[in-house]
Image: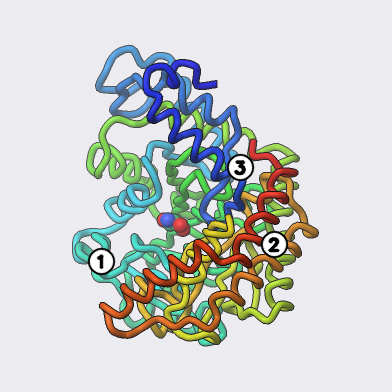
Amino acid sequence: MNQFLSKTDPEIYDLIEAETKRRREGLEMIPSENHTSRAVLEALGSILSDKYAEGYPNKRYYGGNQVIDRVENLVIERAKRAFGTPHANVQPYSGSPANFAVYLAACENGDKVMGQNLTDGGHLTHGAKVNASARFFQSIPYHLKEDGYLDMEEVRKLALEHKPKLIWCGATAYPREIPFEEFGKIADEVGAYLAADVAHIAGLIIAGSHKSPAPFVHIITTTTHKTLRGPRGGMIMVTEKGLQKDPELGQKIDRAVFPAGVQGGPHEHQIAAIGVALKEAMTPEFKEYGHQIVKNAKALASELLAQGLKLTSGGTENHLMVIDLTPFGKGMGVFMEEALDEAGITVNKNTIPQEPSSPFYPSGVRLGTPAITTRGMKEGEMKRIGGFIARIAQEIKTLHLPEDKEQRILYLKEFRANLASNVNVKEVRKEVQELCSSFPIP
Ligand code: DSN
């Protein structure tokens, strides 16, 4: 493995080896990450990387695309089959350019759009203030209720009031099922396009462990590297319902991806690797995997609750959960993320609904089971991991985040220095490594 790289560029080779060791010896629990198969990585590292192919199959701006056209057509067919849609575009470099193409296809500059509020678990590209989607379109965010569930009454009220051109459903940090059907009714009532961004749950949808949005929405966007377990990438599907609303929608999406949008030549090595991931995702083994992700998430959530930790919405129905650390104080996510990291458990600090602190110093951490399920871990291991996490929580619960900026910097510096020598954290790290040694990454 890597016989050429180690000779040509030992520095990069060593860094890849170091990252491989980190992943092998730790628990990857950021819910948007996964461990891809060797087959996916081989396609990604293939000669297809060398080819320019601006345009679409049989309509390219460059010669020599006879084979590339066959690759892209094959992947398009797999995407359509996997999501049950009549149209698919597999060229988006990732989720954000995919979502931007949807705006270009469905909206005019200045149109009103609705999406889940960022700090309530929505995505930047669904109209967050700092993102281009709020710069070029009028963004109206909807929220979660105090119980952590989507406030569908508010969604309907805002939609009736503002008559948006486009409504997004789907999230990056929402542990409950997305009610696609209800969103569909609201979008129909106000004549809006409805786009489901299923980046997080794409693999669950294909496996059948989350409801499919296809019958209820016009457009589906996704990344390909989360629960779908492919390379980094993106896709856009247009549904039957989408074509009924606008028979040109497929062409509009294609034009918005290229040439009208932010992309140039498609990354055909990435597209081929997406194809491999889609093939893998349509097997009985993957179906089992998708269901195990959810079973594991539920088992982990119930252990965390049993250990006295608080979860937003009180639990999970998908692959992720958000620990609400406000019982320890506000803005505690940074301590928990870094302490878990030191113990070999990778999660990310995250806002909670009605966040009392800020997105830079949020009050929760987000974690999930896609990657550890890929390693073959099951409910028994989730119970152990829940115990590790609870032990780390004990180590940070008496800390606090100073309001004053300078004090905060000093406090964090001291926290990091103490963390490196914390014997309880070291003990958890040893147990994490032992656990990981029985569950190799692909
Ligand atoms: N960065 C992705 C996630 O972690 O959910 C969303 O874009």
What residue lies at 45% left-to-right and 27% top-to-bottom? 72
**Whole-number angstrom distance, CA of label 1 to CA of label 2:** 36 Å
**Whole-number angstrom distance, CA of label 2 to CA of label 3:** 16 Å
Q: Is the CB of the residue bearing disc 1 within 8 angstroms of ligand 1?
A: no
- The kind of residue tagged 3 is Arg
User: Seen in the image, is 417 located left or right of residue 380?
Assistant: left
- The kind of residue tagged 1 is Val
Q: Is the CB of the residue bearing disc 3 within 8 angstroms of ligand 1?
A: no
Q: Which residue is mark 2?
A: 385
Number of other residues with Cα within 10 Å of mark 1, as a class: few under 14, some 14 to 19, many 20 or more = few
What x and y, as percent, mark residue 259? 24, 37
Q: Quadrant of residue 65?
A: top left
What x and y, as percent, mark residue 76? 49, 33
Q: Which residue is mark 1?
A: 130
| Residue 358 seen by the camera | yes
Q: Which residue is mark 3?
A: 24
What residue lies at 59% left-to-right and 68% top-to-bottom? 321
Proximity of marks 1 and 2: CB atoms separated by less than 8 Å = no
Q: Quarter holding the C terminus? A: top right
Element type where label 2 sits in the image: helix
Q: Quadrant of residue 13?
A: top left
- The kind of residue tagged 2 is Ile
